[in-house]
Image: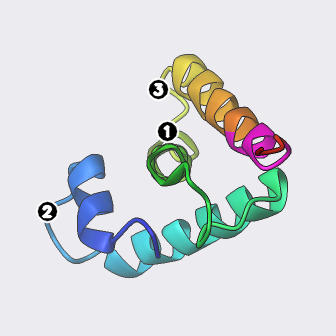
Amino acid sequence: MIVTLEEMKDYLGEDGTNNDSVIAYLIISAQQELETSTGINLSSTTLIETAKRAIRIMVWLSFYADRDAAKNTQYIVAERDRLLTKLEWSSKVETT
């Protein structure tokens, strides 16, 4: 995992261990989704910090937004989409 469980718990504001398995599952799922949707390889991308940010956002959306319709997620969804597009196009740019 390029985003550790502890990093993700800190980002989510989670203190206890009750949700550790759920959070770990969401991290793995987000990484797989990111690789599939963008075509990048997380082990070789030069945009690792961008990938980490996208994964944190994807997990946040799954952990909070999917369970609580009252949250305004418009901005965070737009940011996730922007990061995914950036990552997708980074693998298509030729380097000279």
- Neighbor class of circle 2 (other Cα within 10 Å; few <14, some 14-19, many 20+) is few
Helix, strand or loop for disc 3: loop
Label 1's element? loop
- Which residue type carries mark 1? Asp
Say whether residue 61 is visible.
yes
Label number found at residue 68:
1
Magenta region: 87-92
Residue bearing mark 3: 71
Asked if the residue under mark 1 is in contact with the one under mark 2, i.e. CB atoms within 8 Å, the reply is no
Q: In this view, does 17 lie above or below 52?
A: below
> If you read the primary sequence from the N terminus, does the residue marked by circle 2 or circle 1 appear first?
2
Q: Going 59% across and 19% down the picture, which residue do you hit?
A: 74
Kindly report the distance in space between the C-alpha atoms of the residues bearing marks 2 and 1: 19 Å
Q: Quadrant location of the C terminus?
A: top right
Type of residue at label 3?
Lys
Q: In this view, does 3 lie above or below 60?
A: below
- Please, is residue 71 above or below residue 15 in the view? above
How far across and down, in percent of the image, does residue 69 sit? 55, 32
Callout 2 amino acid: Asp
Q: Is the residue under label 1 in contact with that under label 3 (CB below 8 Å)?
A: yes
Element type at mark 2: loop
The answer to which of marks 3 and 2 sits earlier in the sequence is 2
